[in-house]
Image: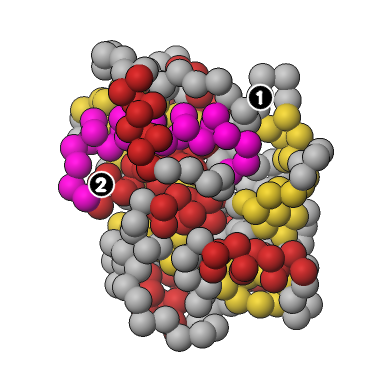
């Protein structure tokens, strides 16, 4: 890794890869998508991952550099190929994924520079998929000992998770982001809880998670923090695909928290950015931040 003297307030850990769609290939991976949008928002994130010494890896590094994202913490693997995901749209615009295993990002190695990076950050973003192989999992577990605010973007992907593994990550989370189906899956491990608020409260109590964010597609999103609930009923757009919209949502939310916005303001902006990205094809489209404000103003709805 090349030296990097720039301060990075938010660090993202995990998969960088290519989404192979029926008609094109696009860069992706949830943590990389989050980092891309954080950079658009001016927050200078760092991405910890690993690519293969191949054309796909070279193109990913070029894409990151071209978008002013640091590549100082992207390792290059001489044995394993850059990650690929075969993505197909389902009946309701939701995507299904075939994630190639193993891939280079399964082998992220521990390095002293990574510990310094995470220790000096305000937020550390990670997910469950990067724990599917021992090497990256152990590196992540070590980094989770840092005193940084830990943001778990759960991203459950069959068959790459199980209850003990998810619980180990939940134990570390200060902020948890998940969609409503993931919330139902995890809550069902402990009983039957008909209301989302009860499911959220269960996780907060059981794992001492300060903030829980639940995205609900066209029904909007909600945040629970310190016994309070905040809601956004969503901004209406014509959906192109949902790849990366949740990642954009999280980037928008964290950017607002970092800039000391209120919880409602953070939720509203996150919802606006997530909706905007859903109106584009792919997880990392070119866009102008002014589009987020215009979308929010054009389709402003009262809070529930």
Q: Quick check: is 270 in the magenta stretch?
A: yes
Query: How far across and down, in percent of the image, does residue 96 sit?
Result: 72, 34
Q: Is residue 198 left or right of residue 114?
A: left
| Residue 128 vertical position relative to residue 49 in the rendered view, above or below | above
Lower sequence index among marks 1 and 2: 1
> Residue drawn 27% across and 26% down?
230
Secondary-structure class at tag 2: helix
Residue 288: which numbered mark, if any? none
Report helix, strand or loop for mark 1: loop
Q: Is the residue marked by circle 1 packed among few (<14), some (14-19), or many (20+) residues within 10 Å?
A: some
State the quadrant of the C terminus.
top left
Is residue 299 part of the magenta span, yes or no? no
Residues marked 1 and 2 touching at CB (< 8 Å): no
Residue named by callout 2:
257
- Helix, strand or loop for the magenta stretch, by majority: helix
Q: How far apart are the alpha carbons under marks 1 and 2?
A: 30 Å
Residue corresponding to mark 1: 93
Q: Position of residue 101 (x, y in %)?
A: 77, 57
The residue shown at (62%, 68%) is 62
Residue 146 rendering spot, x and y as whole percentages: 34, 69
* Apparent side of residue 244 relative to residue 267 in the rendered image (left or right): right
Side (left or right) of 78 relative to 145: right
- Horizontal placement of 7 versus 79: left or right? left
Q: Residue at x 54, y 83 (%)?
A: 1
Magenta highlight range: 259-283
The reply to whether residue 74 is visible in this rendering is yes
**Residue 183 visible:** no
Can you give x and y, in whole percent of width and height, for residue 265 in the image?
Answer: 24, 33
Q: Nearer the viewer, residue 179 or 183?
A: 179
């Amino acid at each position: 890794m090349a030296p990097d003297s720039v301060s990075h307030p938010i660090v993202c850990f995990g998969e960088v890869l290519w989404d192979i769609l029926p008609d094109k290939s696009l860069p992706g991976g949830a943590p990389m998508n989050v980092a891309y949008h954080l950079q658009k928002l001016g927050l200078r994130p760092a991405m910890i991952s690993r690519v293969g010494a191949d054309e796909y890896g070279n193109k990913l590094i070029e894409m990151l550099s071209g978008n002013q994202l640091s590549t100082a913490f992207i390792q290059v693997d001489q044995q394993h190929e850059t990650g690929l995901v075969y993505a197909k749209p389902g009946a309701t615009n939701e995507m299904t994924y075939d994630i190639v295993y193993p891939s280079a990002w399964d082998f992220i190695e521990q390095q002293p520079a990574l510990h310094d990076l995470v220790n000096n950050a305000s937020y550390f973003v990670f997910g469950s998929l990067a724990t599917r192989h021992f090497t990256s999992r152990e590196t992540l577990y070590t980094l989770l000992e840092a005193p940084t605010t830990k943001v778990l973007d759960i991203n459950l992907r069959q068959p790459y998770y199980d209850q003990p593994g998810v619980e180990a990550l939940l134990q570390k989370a200060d902020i948890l982001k998940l969609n409503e189906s993931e919330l139902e899956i995890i809550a069902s491990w402990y009983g039957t809880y008909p209301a989302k608020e009860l499911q959220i409260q269960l996780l907060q109590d059981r794992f001492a998670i300060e903030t829980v964010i639940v995205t609900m597609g066209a029904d909007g999103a909600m945040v629970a923090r310190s016994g309070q609930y905040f809601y956004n009923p969503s901004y209406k757009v014509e959906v192109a695909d949902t790849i990366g919209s949740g990642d954009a949502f999280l980037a928008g939310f964290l950017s607002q928290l970092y800039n000391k916005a209120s919880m409602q303001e953070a939720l509203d902006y996150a919802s606006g950015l997530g909706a905007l990205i859903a109106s584009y094809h792919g997880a990392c489209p070119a866009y102008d931040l002014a589009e987020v404000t215009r979308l929010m103003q054009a389709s402003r709805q009262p809070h529930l």
